[in-house]
Amino acid sequence: MEKVIYLEPDDEITGVIDKIKKVNQDRVILVVPKAATILQSIVNLKILKQQAVRLGKAISIVTSDEIGRNLASQIGLTVYRDLAKRPIPEEEKPTPPQEQTRDLESGAAATTAGELEKKEPPKAQEETKEIPPEPETSKRMIDIRPSGVKFTPYKDGKRAGLGLEKISKSPIRPTKKTSFDGGSLKKLKIVAIILLIVAILEGVLAYFYLPRANVNVVLKAEKLDKTYEITAQKDATLNEETNIIPAQIVSIEKEGNKDLSTTGTKDVGEKAKGTITVINETGADQPLVATTRFVSSNGLVFRSTSSVTVPKAYLDPGGNKVNGSINVSVVADTSGGAYNIGPSNFTIPGLSAAIQSKVYGRSGAAMSGGSSRKIKIVSEADVQKAQTELLNELITLGKEEALSKTNKYEDITLEGSAGGIVVSGLATPAVGAEAETFKYNLKATINVTTVKKSDYYGLLTSKINKEIPNDKELLQGELEKTTESKVVSIDMANGKMVVSSHVVAPIVAKMDLNVMKNNIKGKSVNNAISYLKAFDEVYDAQISLWPFFARKVPITQKRIYINISYHL
């Protein structure tokens, strides 16, 4: 199989080799236009042949350029005048008979000159066996020599550079050593002059086409400082008027558990107990429900264990007033030894203020049995803390997994664009249980909101371009570096995210790089820099040339590389 590659007139040798490397076929035909760069230098063609050998490719050249065909033929490349007419030879000539040959160098080394002179040449040679020429359609008959160039055939194989001699059945005649005559020296001088001219031409071509220029232009910039609010909405379409861009939601189910220490405490000591005598100075019975509060003079609360009715006061037979009274069992409101108090007076805050001074309690003996013992328990705060920490961990893991499913070159995930929805949570042991540590299991859905870079930065660029003058532009590549994005709010359930985009970007003058290249090509470095610095919009300019012998900016624009930066 063969591959035909059409080259451009200004294709460099490096570019041609790159094209050949990408071809899978073993045979490659290069169609080269007349006066193409690659045909102007025999060095280029030699490099092409070397690379073709290294890559295992059979290279053929099709061109109407006679000089190019001549150069290609000289280094052994197959050439054609017309792609459609190949493989018709340009000049047909019969294929000489092929004879068995052998290298005489080893034999010559073993035979001295004197011995060769003693041998007589045979008077008659036996006829060698001829091999008939192949048909004209054979590829071995393709004439790779350019048309219009006259080639003088060599008179013998040795001058043709074959290094081989024909072998026949007759004895081998030794060749006599001969010295160079005047004609041979003249031919050598001509060859040397031709080689010198070729070398000079190659040097000239290398001087003009090999160099490259790296041009660094620093433009004066103005700072743009703006904040835009963009809404990313699932299933939405891009709308520059409302600042809405489409969002993609990636959902990941995650489950995990976490062990934590408990921080809740509980007093499980005993409550103090005792008896209070309730006194009633009024003329009416006073009912008291169970758990009625009795507050001691030092503020401790005790509660009755049963309901009672305190009888009213009455007159004895002697006409003296006797207060009604009844004993009631009480227990301290909370546990602790502080409730083990001695005899005390008690008020009943549940009664009206007017009656509290007439219905009250007294203890004739100390309260007893109160003690304290605090334990650690699982509290509500412990469970809430466990859920928050574990959910954040699952969000981080879910975000990494979600990002692996997106295209990092096309999609962006802003900080704060991931969130979790709790599916279920379980604390073991449960809230209120005595424990030093507990385990919390959580299952959650992690949602990650992503947007396309092209949508996000495209909308920002469109907004900025509407606010700057027509002769100014946002320097390419700087928007992503200088934009600070922050998620203001996110609604995971509805797939909506509001982003605050703070842009601090450089704005520079619009410059036509092709015009710039055209106006500095062929100039000296100093003249090119002076030309660039003459613009008010240019802050600075630097030019470096390669290779070291280059003195001017290349004359071809493809060899000029311009890098734009800015200065605020």
Image (cartoon, rainbow, N blue to C red):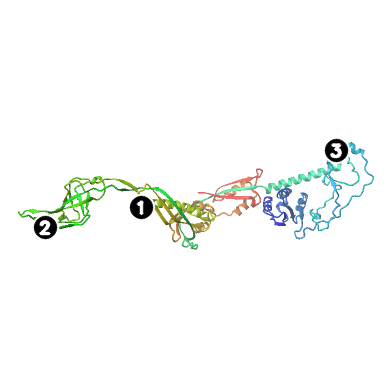
Q: Position of residue 79 (x, y in %)?
A: 76, 54
Residue beneath label 2, please?
A: 283
**Residue 134 position within the rendered picture, expressed as x and y whole percent measured from the top left:** 83, 56
Query: Local crowd at mark 2 within 10 Å, few (<14), some, or many (≥20)?
Result: few
Disc 3 marks a residue whose amino acid type is Ala
Locate residue 80, reporting x and y percent.
77, 56
What is the x, y in percent for residue 277? 16, 51
Disc 2 marks which amino acid?
Gly
SS class of the residue under badge 3?
helix
Height in image: 253 above or below 366? below
Looking at the rendered structure, the kind of residue marked 1 is Val
**In this rendering, position of residue 442 left or right of residue 24:** left
Residue marked by disc 1: 431
Looking at the image, tell me whether mark 2 or mark 1 is earlier in sequence order. Answer: 2
On screen, residue 233 above or below 96: below
* Residue 276 relative to residue 460: left or right: left
Instruction: Work out which residue is located at the far right of the displayed protein and give it.
Output: 123
Q: Earlier in the sequence, mark 3 or mark 2?
A: 3
Viewer-side residue, 379 vs 483: 379
Q: CA distance from mark 3 to mark 1?
A: 107 Å
Q: Can you name the residue that lies furthest to the left here?
A: 318
* Distance in Å between CA atoms under marks 2 and 1: 51 Å
Of mark 3 and mark 1, the one earlier in the sequence is 3
* Residue 464 seen in this snapshot: no
Circle 1 crowding by C-alpha within 10 Å: few under 14, some 14–19, many from 20: some
143 vs 170, left or right, is left
Residue identifier under label 3 = 110
Q: Are marks 2 and 1 in contact (CB under 8 Å)?
A: no
> Helix, strand, or loop for circle 2?
loop
Specify the quadrant of the image occupied by residue 547: top right
